[in-house]
Image (cartoon, coloured by chain):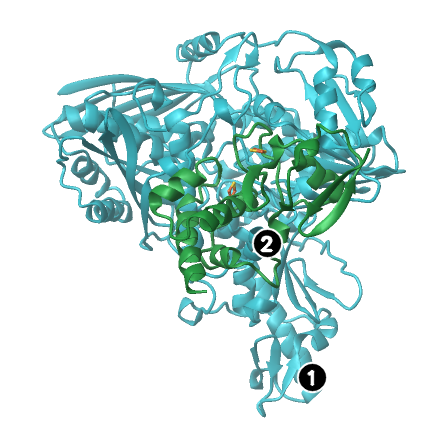
Chain colours: A green, B cyan
Amino acid sequence: MPTTLTINGQTHSVDLPDDVPLLWVLRDEIGLTGTKFGCGVAACGACTVHIDGAAVRSCQVALADVWGEVTTIEGIGTPDRMAIIQEAWVEHQVAQCGYCQSGQIMQAADLLATTPAPTDADIDDAMQGNLCRCGTYPRIRAAIHAAAAKLQEA
Amino acid sequence: MSRLGTITRRSFMVLGVAVAGGVAFGTYAVRKTPPNPLSPEGEAVAMNPWLIIDQEGVTVIAPRAEMGQGVHTTLAAMVAEELDVAWKDVRVLHGPPAQAYYNAAMMEAGLPSAHYTRDEMSGWQEALLHAVPKMLSLQITGGSTSTVDGFDRMRHAGAMARESLKEVAADRLGLARSQLRTEAGMVIGPDGRGLPYADLAADAAQVEVDQPDLRPRTDWKYLGRAMPRLDMVSKATGTAEFGADVRLPGMKFATVRMNPKLGGEMRGFDASAALTMPGVERVIDLGSGIAVVASNTWLAFQAADAVEIDWGPAPHAETSAELFGKIAASLDDPPNSTLRDDGDVGAMTGTVVQAEYRVPFLAHATMEPMNATALLEGEYLTIWCGNQAPVVIQQKSAEAAGVSDQNTTVHTTFLGGGFGRRGESDYAALAARIARELPGIPVKVTWSREEDMRHDFYRPAAIARFSGAVENGTATALFARIAAPSVTRSAMQRLAGFAPPGPDKGHVEGAFDQPYAIANYRVQGHLTDSPVPVGFWRSVGSSMNGFFHESFIDELAHAAGADPLEFRLGLIRPAHAPSAILLETVRGMSGWTGRTPQGVGRGVAFTYSFGTPVAEIIEVRDEDGYIRIANAWIACDPGTALDPGIIEAQMVSGLIYGLSAAAQEEITFLGGEVEQFNFPDHDALRMHNTPRIEVKILENNTLMGGIGEPGTPPAAAALANALFDLTGIRARELPLNKSFDLLL
Ligand code: FES
Ligand code: FES
C-alpha cells in the first residue's frame, strides 16, 4: 500500500516496502539528491533532514515510521533564494568537496532553531555527529556564529 | 597488454633515458597542439580546448577534477584574469578525456631531485616534461600539481582568446587592435562603444594571433585574491551534482559485493533468497564478485547481503602482524633507492641515536562512497562519475563493456572527496561491466560504506629505521631506511600492466628531499612485495615520511639538548632560507618559547612536499587525564599565492586529514580481510576535537608549489612531538590513540 509523505510542503505517494529508509526514498524514489548517503549507520550525518523541524538521520528512519513533515536541503532555500544559513555558508566559503554540507547545514539549522545564540560548546555538542572528511569544521563554526547573528537581527 | 600499457611502457623508457641524457625524439607529435576536443552545441563557440563563449558568458573547461580543493575556481580565475570577464559570468565544466588536458607538472614532480634545489628549468627539460604527459594523455588530478600546471596554459588560453576577439573587433570597426581594450566581456573602442564577446566569438575562433605577453602580477584583479568559489552556492543548496546524484530516465540502482579477502577469487554463490526480495531484478555474476540490480539502492544493499557467496582465500598474508613481518624483512634486501647520499653515514661520532617507527595501512574514506553510472547503447558506452583520471576511466570502462575507447564518453561530476582514491578506475569499470548486462538501461552502481572501506587501495603500512648523531648541539649524521609496499608500482601495475623499474621516488618523498644541511645524510628506500593493493593517499610517501623524518629530527634535538625549533632552524637556514622563515613564522604565531607550562605540550614539524614547504606547531592540553589537541599554527610558502582563501582552507584541510589519521585511523587485516567496516571503526576528527587553527601564507619561495597535500605530512609528527613534550613518552607508532588517552 502506498505511503503518503509530505516533503518540502509537497505531498508524495510512495510505493516502497515499509522498511526502506527515508534517505533512499528521497534520493532514489523522489529524486531529491541533495540529501547524501555517507555511512548508513548513523555515523556521519550526511543524510540529515528535518522531520517536523527537528534534525534526524534519514538513513535511520524507515518509510513507515516517518512521523511528520519532512524538510530537506532543497526545502530550506534555493540558489536564487537562499536561507540565511546558506548565505552564511557562502559568505564564509565553507564547502570543499561539499558532499557533507547538506547534512551540516540541516544539523546547524536545527541548532539555531533551538539555540539562537549558540556558544562554541553548543556547536561542538550539536555538530559532532556530522563528519567532514575535508575538514571544514572551522569555517562551519564561523558560519554558524554568523548565521546566528544575522537571524537575531532579522 | 592493453594499448595504454604498450604506450606507457615505451614512453617511460623514453623518459628514463631522456632525463639522464637529453635525448631527442619525435618532436612533431610533441609540438603539435593536441586537437580541441570540444564541440559545443547551438550558438556557443569553443575558442580553444579551455574556453567556450556564448551569450551567457564564458565557460572555462577545467582539465582537472574539482574534489574540494577549489581548483575550478583558481583555474577559472587564471583564464578570467587575461580575458576580462565579470566573475559572475564565469562558469566551469569538467573537461572530457582528451590529450589536450595532459598534466605536465605531474611529470615534473617525478624528477628525482629535491624541489628546493631546482631553478627555472632548461629548455629541453621543459620540452620533455610536456612531451611525455602529452603523448600519454596524462590527464590526472594529483600530486598537488593542478595550479602549477595550469598557471601558464590557462592564462595563455584567456590571453589568446582576448587578442583574437580584439582582432575581429578591430577588423569590423576598421581600427587597429592596439586601439581597443577589453572589459567585462566586451571589446571596447576608443569612443567607448562595446562589442560583446559573444558577437565576436564565432569569427574570433578562426583567427590566429601571436601569443601575447601575460599580464604582470601588479595588474592582477582576480589572481592573488580570495575569490568566491564558483561551486559554493550549489554546494550550500544541495544542487551540486556528484556521481551519486546522477539521474537518468529508466535508471536502475545497483550495488556490488567483491571478495573481502582482497585479491581472492569467488568460488560460487547462491542468489535464490536474494532474488525473492522486493525490488530485486537481477543478480549478476561478475566473476570476481556479484552485482544486485534493483529498483532502489537500499533494496540492492539488502539483497546483496542475502546472496550467499563462497569466497576463496586472499593470496596475501592473513594478518597485519604477518604483513609487518614482510615489511620488516624487506629492510634486509638491497635498497631500491638511495636518493640522498651526502658525506658518509658509516662512521657516526658523538651521541648516536637510533629509532624504529611504524605506520599502519590507511583507507581514503572519501565522504562519498565509490559509485558510477553507466549506459551501454549498442557499441556506445557512457559513464558518469567523479574521477581524477578521465582517460583511464574511459579506457578501463571501455574494456569492461567490450567497446572501443572512441565510443566511450565520460562525464565527470563533482567528486565527494578524492584524496587519491578516485585516481583509480575500478568503480567505473564495474559499472561498465554491469551495464554490459543491461543493454539500453542506465544503471547507477553505489557501493556501501563497508564495501568502500574494505576494497580500497590503501596507504601502505611502513617501517622506518633511523640512526643519527649529534655533536655540539647540532646534527652531524642522519641515515634513514624506509620499507613499505610501493604505491607507484602497485598503481602502475593496475594502470599499465607493468611496474616501472628504477628508483621509486614517491616512496622516499618527504624524507630524501628535505632542506636540512646535515653533512652526512643518507636516505634509502626498500620496497616490500605485498599484494595488498596500495594507492595514492593524500600526500603519498610524504604522509608517512613526514612522520618518520620529523619525529627523528625531534629525537635528535632532544639528544642534543636543544630546543626542537631552534635545532631545526640551525639546520634548515643554510639549506633553504624560505623554509627557515616558515619556522620563524610559526614560532612567532604561537609564541613558542621552548618551555610549556604543566599540562601543556607543544610540538613542531616541518615538511617540504609537492613544491610547498610547511611548518606546523601543535599544542596539546591535559584535560582531566585526557589529552585535547587544542591549537595548531601553520605557515606555508607556495611561492605564489594564487588564492589565499583556498590555500588557507587546504592547509587546514590537510592538517585535519593528517591529524585524523595520526590520532585514530588504521586498517588492519585478519583472515586476509580488512577488519574495519565503517566510520565507527575508522573515524576522523570532528567538530569537537578539531584544534583551533591559524594559517599564514608566505611568498618567498622562487618556484610555485601545490596546496592540496602539503598540509598533511607534518601533522602526525607535530602531534607526536607535542605528546612527547607533554608526557615524556615518545610514540614511534601510529595511530597515537594506542599510546595516549586522546580526547576524541
Ligand atoms: S548516512 Fe545517515 S548518518 Fe551517515
Ligand atoms: S566538504 Fe568534503 S566532506 Fe565535508
Residue B124's place in the image compared with B402, above or below, is below
Residue B385 visible (yes or no) = no
Residue for point 51% across, 51% down:
B70
Relative to B612, is B424 above or below?
above
Dot 2: element: helix
Whether residue B698 can be seen here: yes
Identify the amino acid type marked 2. Ile
* The image quadrant in which ligand 1 is located: top right
* Closer-to-camera residue (B692/B733): B692
The C terminus of chain B lies in which quarter of the figure?
A: top left
Residue that extends furthest to the left in the rendered view of this protein: B472
**Residue B397 appears in which quarter of the rendering?**
top right
Residue corresponding to mark 1: B171
Label 2 Cα neighbours within 10 Å, binned few <14 / some 14-19 / many ≥20: some
Placement of B579 over or under B325, stated as above or below: below
Number of the front mark, 1 or 2: 2
